[in-house]
């Protein structure tokens, strides 16, 4: 670039946490990684124009970006061998509101949808708890036949009135914009348990509570070296996380599932998958214990 005296016109790209200072940055790379989710998020932001002030939207911008990325993944049609094959005209949204929005949000829809007899229902109101796509991962050591589960306080059980709001769970976390599910699993394992995962084995992709929640989960078992002493207390201080790891034998995991002490869907589902697949894993198939 030719240097001259006086002011120069330059193009500056601002991306907050999406741009690493001093790193080599290319617009085309940014567009490929973040473009679709940013465009989806822009539509969500414009829907709030004249409804919410700019400062309240700015507070939720990161969460909205994650929701936008979830919308991009959701736009990829799933299989329809048995279920109703929906077309865009099969759900008609008459109006949409957002009565609550903070870290999560609640949206209300006045809508009608196609019945199985091909007629449309009358307009009905449905509320949706809006969160983001997330990952769960259970580290499993097939050589020692043990797993690592975590324990932490959960607000959901408290709100239900559960006198034991500390739950035994898998490692889990939301998928950030520009991140895929496997990258998220490896990041969360390091944050919540200090573990470098080996081979990730897909368990399932699913809505845990589709009647009212938009959350969508990608669950994995991760082949991981789990020697004695690997458990500890972890979590991000900035998110007030206090997460304790438990290193337990596979049979103890299944006993906790049987007694009901394991009481969350993702760990139960993953434990049952591992119970089915454990013989081949213990026989040495898919054995890559350390992340490459």
Image (cartoon, grey):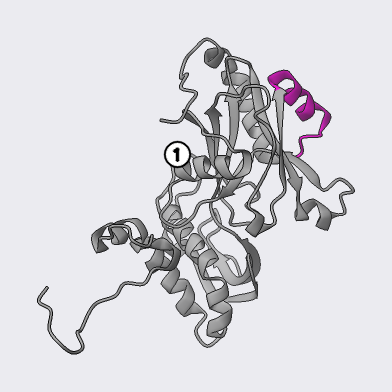
Q: Position of residue 229 (x, y in %)?
A: 68, 26
At a point 56% along the width and 13% down the height, the residue shown is 282
At a point 15% along the width and 87% down the height, the residue shown is 5
Segment colored magenta: 249-263
Residue bearing mark 1: 81
Image position of 235 (left or right of 3): right
Position of residue 262 relative to residue 63, above or below, is above
Image quarter (top left, top right, bottom left or bottom right) of the C terminus: top left
At a point 46% along the width and 63% down the height, the residue shown is 68
Q: Position of residue 45 (x, y in %)?
A: 48, 76
Q: Is residue 212 visible?
A: no
Q: Nearer the viewer, residue 157 or 31?
A: 31
Q: Nearer the viewer, residue 98 or 52?
A: 52
Q: Is residue 253 magenta?
A: yes
Q: Position of residue 76 (x, y in %)?
A: 40, 51
Image position of 44 (left or right of 36): right
Q: Is residue 159 visible?
A: yes
Mark 1 surroundings within 10 Å by alpha-carbon count, few (fewer than 14), some (14 through 19), many (20 or more) = few
Dominant SS in magenta: helix
Labels in figure, total:
1
At a point 24% along the width and 60% down the height, the residue shown is 28
Q: Nearer the viewer, residue 106 or 89?
A: 106
């Amino acid at each position: 670039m030719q240097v001259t005296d006086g002011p120069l016109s330059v193009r500056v790209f601002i991306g907050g946490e999406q741009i690493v200072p001093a790193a080599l940055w290319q617009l085309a790379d940014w567009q490929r990684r973040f473009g679709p989710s940013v465009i989806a998020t822009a539509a969500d932001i414009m829907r709030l124009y004249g409804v919410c002030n700019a400062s309240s939207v700015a507070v939720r911008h990161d969460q909205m970006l994650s929701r936008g990325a979830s919308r991009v993944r959701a736009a990829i049609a799933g299989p329809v061998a048995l279920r109703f094959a929906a077309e865009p005209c099969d759900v008609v949204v008459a109006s949409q509101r957002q009565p609550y929005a903070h870290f999560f949000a609640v949206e209300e829809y006045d809508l009608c949808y196609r019945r199985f007899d091909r007629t449309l229902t009358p307009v009905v109101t449905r509320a949706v708890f809006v969160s983001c796509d997330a990952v769960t991962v259970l580290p499993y050591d097939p050589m020692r036949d043990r797993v690592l589960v975590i324990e932490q306080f959960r607000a959901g059980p408290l709100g239900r009135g559960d006198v034991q709001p500390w739950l035994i769970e898998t490692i889990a976390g939301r998928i950030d914009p520009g991140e895929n599910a496997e990258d998220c699993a490896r990041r969360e394992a390091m944050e919540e348990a200090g573990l470098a995962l080996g081979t990730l084995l897909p368990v399932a992709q699913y809505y845990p509570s589709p009647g009212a929640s938009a959350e969508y989960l990608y669950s994995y078992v991760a082949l991981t070296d789990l020697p004695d002493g690997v458990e500890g207390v972890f979590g991000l201080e900035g998110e007030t996380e206090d997460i304790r790891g438990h290193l337990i034998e596979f049979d103890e995991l299944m006993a906790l599932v049987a007694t009901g002490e394991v009481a969350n869907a993702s760990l139960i589902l993953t434990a049952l998958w591992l119970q089915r697949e454990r013989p081949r894993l213990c026989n040495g198939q898919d054995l890559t214990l350390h992340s490459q």
